[in-house]
Amino acid sequence: MSCDYTHTALHGYLDGELDASRSEEFERHLEGCRECAKALETEESLRSILQRSGLCESAPHSLRKKIRAELDAATSVPIAQRIPLWRWAAVAASIVLVAAISWYAWPGSGSGTRNPAAPPFTAAELIDAHIRSLQPGHLTDVASTDQHTVKPWFNGKLDFAPPVKDFAEDGFPLVGGRLDVLGGRNVAVLIYARRKHFINVFVLPTKEPDTPIHPPGLRQGYQWLHWRHQGMEYCAVSDVSVADLHELAQLIYQ
Amino acid sequence: MSGFDQGRGSDLLDVHERARFEQLVLPHLDAAFNLARWLLRRREDSEDVTQEAMLRAYRFFRGFHGGDARAWLLQIVRNTCYTWLEKNRPVELMSEFDEELHPQPSVSPESLAIAGDNRERLGRALETLPPRFREVLVLRELEGCSYKEIATITAIPIGTVMSALARARQRLQRALTQPPVEEARREL
Ligand SMILES: [Zn+2]
Ligand SMILES: [Zn+2]
């Protein structure tokens, strides 16, 4: 019970926090010190007990929900979003009018330099496509909650294969798929449900580098997020909360 | 306040900041809750304080300029826990930290393994340690934090993290292999 190393370097060694020379020094010491050899064995045993223990607790789902609600309350919503839905519906009919309204805060939009992370469509195009999809009979071309039905459905209809995954267990069941034309390009659309709301996820191939998930803008009561990942470009649009939309985006991103 | 600049709190963040917070900070909610859970011991209190800490983190988020988001968040969680303890259970903070390491009869790995096989008992042993010992163990063994992160989160100098862990581990071994006080009394 007299070796100094037992209460100092031994722990740095156990934790992998010694630099190479101190680590070697301790290993040399370990060969000749029975006390440290035994103590190291005990410490390793304690570590494995702690790590196997199941003492690590995850945040309960109810807490997660409460926190998201509080964050929502502490997030400012652009004035555009406070326009009542009926007024939005009135203008939605005219794409020209919508496009004329300069849309909210995509950094760099309007300036001469094109932001390399900029989404391929305008807010107006996306929201219009989203609204169109909500008309009776327009939501899905293939209605199925089975990713193994939806995925092959796209085969031969497009020159790329969109990744299709169901997230029912995470609260975002897959509803189906659809083909759409946006900005003159053929895109795959995956439709997910969130409670009574629908989320359209537009997918098309890209040669641009990956981007994180970001909100190019928030408009007229609709949320949308854009990202690129592994050669695919995604735009998710819905009237669910930005937190919910972000959760789905992250599931898809993984 | 050492470590990260916690910045100036502000009332509302915009949607871009919200999205960044979702990506960088929210993934560490489990770690935040786990730390609060072991510092405060009672589940209900831990939920309340975690919630408060997350909201504080959100308000301070403009002061976070990148880097280790987990350490940044856990530092806020820890501070919130200690403030809460000072107010609600000050007695728990009056435990000694710089206690001498007394030579102890060494504990065998076998007896530890037997004692540690029982999750309840392990949890109770951990809870008997003073908070400052408990937190370094939780951060190191349950969250896998580096010494640098532990120093940031707990505001102790990095040079003393190793000895703090040495003491904490010794205390836990003792708590695990010695019978609880009541049982010891009954045996007298
Ligand atoms: Zn030694
Ligand atoms: Zn952005």
Image (cartoon, helix red, strand yellow):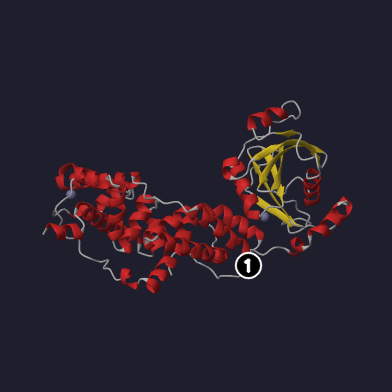
Report helix, strand or loop for mark 1: loop
Which part of the image, by quadrant, shows the C terminus of chain B? bottom left
- Residue B79, placed above or below residue A118: below
Q: In this rendering, does residue A102 appear at all?
A: no
x then y, percent, for residue A136: 81, 42
Image quadrant of ligand 2?
bottom right
Which part of the image, by quadrant, shows the N terminus of chain B? bottom left
x then y, percent, for residue B83: 42, 71
x then y, percent, for residue B103: 15, 57
Q: Amino acid at mark 1?
A: Leu
Out of B84 and B76, give the one closest to the viewer: B84
B139 to the left or right of B163: right
B37 to the left or right of B59: left
Residue at 57%, 52% in the rendered image? B23
Toward the top, the furthest residue is: A156
x then y, percent, for residue A19: 33, 49
Out of B21 and A195, give the one closest to the viewer: A195
Residue at 48%, 60% in the rendered image? B73
- Residue B95, placed above or below residue A181: below
Tell me the residue that label 1 is attached to: B12
Residue at 57%, 41% in the rendered image? A169
Residue at 28%, 47% in the rendered image? B118
Toward the front, the furthest residue is: B186
